């Protein structure tokens, strides 16, 4: 869990630097998922998909 919290900080910074990079949202979603934040994870997966990060489709189905 500690690594997921550290990863969250890194992804938050990456999103701050480039809010149009879908991979950062996807990866932050994975970290949120590991921390038990399903709602936040789904928001990130949907944002990643909206930005054209196609791998996010593999996780968006978990948000139903």
Image: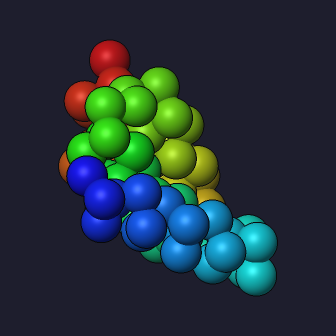
Residue extending farthest front: 2
| Viewer can see residue 26 | no
Quadrant assignment, res 14: bottom right
Give left or right: position of 62 versus 38: left
Q: Quadrant of the C terminus?
A: top left
Q: Is residue 31 shown above or below 32? A: below
Residue 30 in the image: x percent, y percent?
A: 32, 53
Is residue 19 at least partly visible in the picture? yes
Left/right placement of residue 19 relative to residue 39 reads: right
- Residue extending furthest toward the top: 64
Residue 47 x/y as whole percent: 58, 49
15 lies above or below 37: below
Q: Nearer the viewer, residue 54 or 6?
A: 6
Q: Nearer the viewer, residue 4 or 17?
A: 4
Give the residue at x 42% y 57%.
5
Give x and y (percent) for residue 46. 51, 42
Location of residue 47 with respect to 17 vertically, above or below: above
What's the image's color scheme?
rainbow
Residue 34 pos. (x, y %): 25, 45
Q: Count numbered badges in the picture.
A: 0
Q: Residue at x 51, y 35 (%)?
A: 40
12 lies above or below 40 = below
The image quadrant of residue 63 is top left
Q: Quadrant of residue 62?
A: top left
């Amino acid at each position: 869990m500690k690594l997921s919290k550290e990863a969250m900080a890194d992804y938050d910074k990456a999103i701050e630097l480039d809010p149009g990079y879908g991979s950062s949202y996807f990866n932050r979603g994975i970290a949120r998922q590991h921390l038990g934040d399903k709602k936040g994870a789904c928001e990130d997966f949907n944002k990643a998909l909206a930005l054209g990060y196609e791998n996010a489709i593999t996780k968006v189905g978990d948000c139903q």
